[in-house]
Amino acid sequence: MADQPPLIDQHSHGAVHGELGLGSFEAHLAAAAGAHGPAPAGTSYFDSWTGLALRRWCPPLLGLEPHCPPARYLARRRELGAFRAGRMLLRGAGIGTFLLEAGTPSDLTSATELATAAEARAHEVVRLESLAEQVADTSGSVDSFIGYTAEALYAAAQHATAFASGAAYCDGHAPPAGEVRRAADRWLRGRRPGQRLAEPALVRHLLWSAMATGLPVQLHCPDPQPLAGFLRATAGIGADVVLLPGAPHHRRAAQLAAAFAHVYADTGPRPEETLGHAPFGKLLFSSGTRGLPELYVTGARLFVRALERVVREWTEEGMCGPGEGRRIAQMIGAGTARRVYRLPAAATG
Amino acid sequence: MADQPPLIDQHSHGAVHGELGLGSFEAHLAAAAGAHGPAPAGTSYFDSWTGLALRRWCPPLLGLEPHCPPARYLARRRELGAFRAGRMLLRGAGIGTFLLEAGTPSDLTSATELATAAEARAHEVVRLESLAEQVADTSGSVDSFIGYTAEALYAAAQHATAFASGAAYCDGHAPPAGEVRRAADRWLRGRRPGQRLAEPALVRHLLWSAMATGLPVQLHCPDPQPLAGFLRATAGIGADVVLLPGAPHHRRAAQLAAAFAHVYADTGPRPEETLGHAPFGKLLFSSGTRGLPELYVTGARLFVRALERVVREWTEEGMCGPGEGRRIAQMIGAGTARRVYRLPAAATG
Amino acid sequence: MADQPPLIDQHSHGAVHGELGLGSFEAHLAAAAGAHGPAPAGTSYFDSWTGLALRRWCPPLLGLEPHCPPARYLARRRELGAFRAGRMLLRGAGIGTFLLEAGTPSDLTSATELATAAEARAHEVVRLESLAEQVADTSGSVDSFIGYTAEALYAAAQHATAFASGAAYCDGHAPPAGEVRRAADRWLRGRRPGQRLAEPALVRHLLWSAMATGLPVQLHCPDPQPLAGFLRATAGIGADVVLLPGAPHHRRAAQLAAAFAHVYADTGPRPEETLGHAPFGKLLFSSGTRGLPELYVTGARLFVRALERVVREWTEEGMCGPGEGRRIAQMIGAGTARRVYRLPAAATG
């Protein structure tokens, strides 16, 4: 860890504000594991791989010994106050730059808040569905909605670092105007506050429009396979696509990143699953955090630990020299993100 | 192994009675690998991962050195007699409690026989399809079949430890009565002796009925994905579901166990594939044995070996303390099964 | 490596002739990773797992130190000339026998050329689609095409070592004659030069016809699952089938090899993914090379390295003795291929 320069975390949603009791803390830990609801009686989400990582790395950042009892950790957290504890955790995570997908839930930190709390840089990733929802709030007709969305996209492209889309499927053609109009009409009539845009033709229209701005587009894809046609068709357009796959599809995402020059794949905190399946320069780290600031710590440390293990092993058996291994680790941890998202060079130190 | 308390094997079908020649022994070993038929000339199922495990751990239980030639092992087995050899193997497997899915093939040990042979506890898991088949043998009409099945389910729930179902697909609603009646009618007319019940609507009806008893239900699911709707819909019902996935779906089963409080996942003898994907308290060991008593030994030892390796690694790099690691291993090996299946506390020693 | 006898590489397409500049060398490296097009600016296919392996093992075969800069390696390659460098690489790969799927691209070595260059044996695998394409070039009618194809298949079976097919799907029945005739008619009318035969019914007809010759058939199957019905139906026919799966389906292919006596599975250069899922005698090595002679080296060395790691681990923890481990490695690396393809015994030395 000593010589690991700060990571760039290419995808997260931000950290919660405010104090958390044992129940709400566990609920956030559960949500990070994909859980709907509390742990069954007699079990705890602290007893999980993420829980072990949290207990290993977070207590020392708050002045406690590793693996202290969860109750003691939470008491210390309350004693410091959520604001101060959050800052100590974020500053100790080893992340120098955050790409933040700003969303609608207002209980998570904004990019500016995150940058201040972590003493780091933070850049905004604009979720296309959120952008359209905001436009829809102030549009009177399908025509004005479609026009204003195009303008909003263009405006966002001037300051945002990337776009993000939740298109689960997209083929090789932008949907025709008529289909987009009908989808927009259907959605504008039926939408309810707080409901995420999920009209497939409209989501695909936004995705193709975003690609035209030239900004990188992050694609949330539980399974990347249904996007293969889209990836093939956008090879020459000039915008990069970064796949954010769900488990167990990281390997498939890496293969698609290997196949197309403009496609990249997120490794999450487990880079070892993808290393053999794409050139190292096509893989990028993210913590994927939404909620506990602790998850920035565990995501970053698990990533660094896994990569260090692999590189140590490679070095020991002569698959690469130590400098080479360090170079690869830095590429996946920060270098490639800096290039793809055109981020300023790292500060020294 | 020294300090490993006895395992609870949450799923198996029992061991064969009777003497086995080289041919029938290999046939059982082959079946354990999913094979239909004998090994091709020049090969042997002893040359497999399970075969290596058998040759490593079983000969010492019969007084031979590890890795002795298969012919010598089988000679020793015959010399002892199948009955005595079976007892020595079962008592040496390190399993203190068996959950046995009693089936129709009468050449496998019953729960009582297994308990005696292994000097262990054994509890019955009632396969829903078998229960319905038994009811069908004595029912005159669709109405009486459906009524008697409900009664038989209720009666079984008084003594059984869990139910098991082979429903490959199930959505969020119990099938309507008319559909169940039609499926029952079709099946009762067309069924032949020894044929397993496979009318989807009837199988789903049995599953929903079993859930209503509150007993845990084990779900055989080569692929657990088509059951996601059922799992979502049964979150509040009060009965636990334990997924028994086929390779390579153990990870997906673990993710579903992470997502729903009442869902658990079988690890089989390879816990390392699932550890990162569900809280440790949602994972349970099974050997999955059907046939050779040797497979209880290999299943249990491979499981313990794999868990010991992982825990040693975690401990060495500070991811957990040694006590923590032992606690996690015991949870997956026995503690969670004891809780989910409401089994009596382990005897001391 | 010292005591590893020469491997049998059961599947490759041959090495390129002629000099390669940095651009074309990288293009070949990219193609090996499944890439369509050059690496994005700032990245290189040398920075990949295959690239690392190449830089580890190829420079020493050309008299350079491992991990020398790519530019230096390519300069040395030019200095030696492609012909001489190719021979040095092929002779240093550790492969004693090649099974070569001869294809239409004329810029790859033939079996005879490969044998000479590598000072090894090389046997031809006849691709069924290519055979049909050659027949079609000289057939006047559907009838003559079908008749001549049968003759050509029979003639090929006299000298070839195996057939290969690209049937992505095949069920349990040979397609009826009428369907084959219609498919042949459609294809013969519409075919264009250089276009690979892809009429499903015709491809399946060729596959069933090839099975009837008794020669082993290699099945290219990105996903082997759609072939399960075919495998079940051909269990008694007398011809072996070797599955050549794409990632991530190696494990599924191994399971199918475990299930059917006449089915085998390719491991590619990563045997560790399949070892637990089929008897060791059902797994065979291949490099899968198409293009750079370097890929024979990396495929073979990665395979040997991975197997050595696994066997060392097994031996250390007593899962097998050292002799046993060596025997298993030799089985997967050469012995099984020798048996399945009825190859002459290895020369001594």
Image (cartoon, coloured by chain):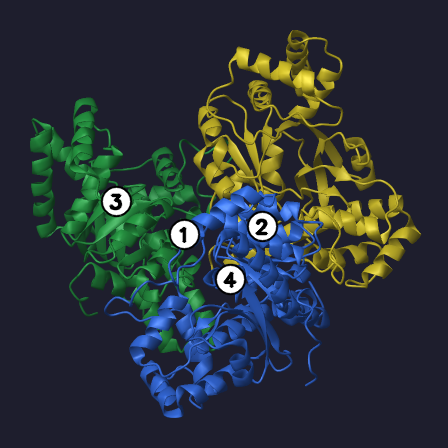
Chain colours: A blue, B green, C yellow
Query: Which residue corresponds to mark 2?
Result: C326
Q: Residue furthest right?
A: C79
Q: Quadrant of the C terminus of chain A?
A: bottom right
| Label 3 neighbour load within 10 Å: few <14, some 14-19, many 20+ | many
Question: What chain letter is assigned to the residue under label 1?
Answer: A
> Total number of numbered labels?
4
Q: CA distance from mark 2 to mark 4?
A: 67 Å
Image x and y of residue A209, in percent? 61, 54
Amino acid bearing label 4: Val
| Label 1 neighbour load within 10 Å: few <14, some 14-19, many 20+ | few
Amino acid bearing label 1: Arg
Question: What chain letter is assigned to the residue under label 2?
Answer: C
Q: Quadrant of the N terminus of chain A?
A: bottom right
For residue B13, the mark is 3
Image x and y of residue C164, in percent? 63, 29
Q: CA distance from mark 4 to mark 3?
A: 60 Å
Query: Which residue corresponds to mark 1?
Result: A189
B64 left or right of B105 in image: right
> Could you tell me if the residues under marks 2 and 1 are in contact, i.e. CB atoms within 8 Å?
no
Image x and y of residue A149, in percent? 56, 58
Query: Which residue corresponds to mark 4?
Result: A135
| Label 2 neighbour load within 10 Å: few <14, some 14-19, many 20+ | some
Question: In which quarter of the view is residue B149 placed?
Answer: top left
Amino acid bearing label 2: Arg
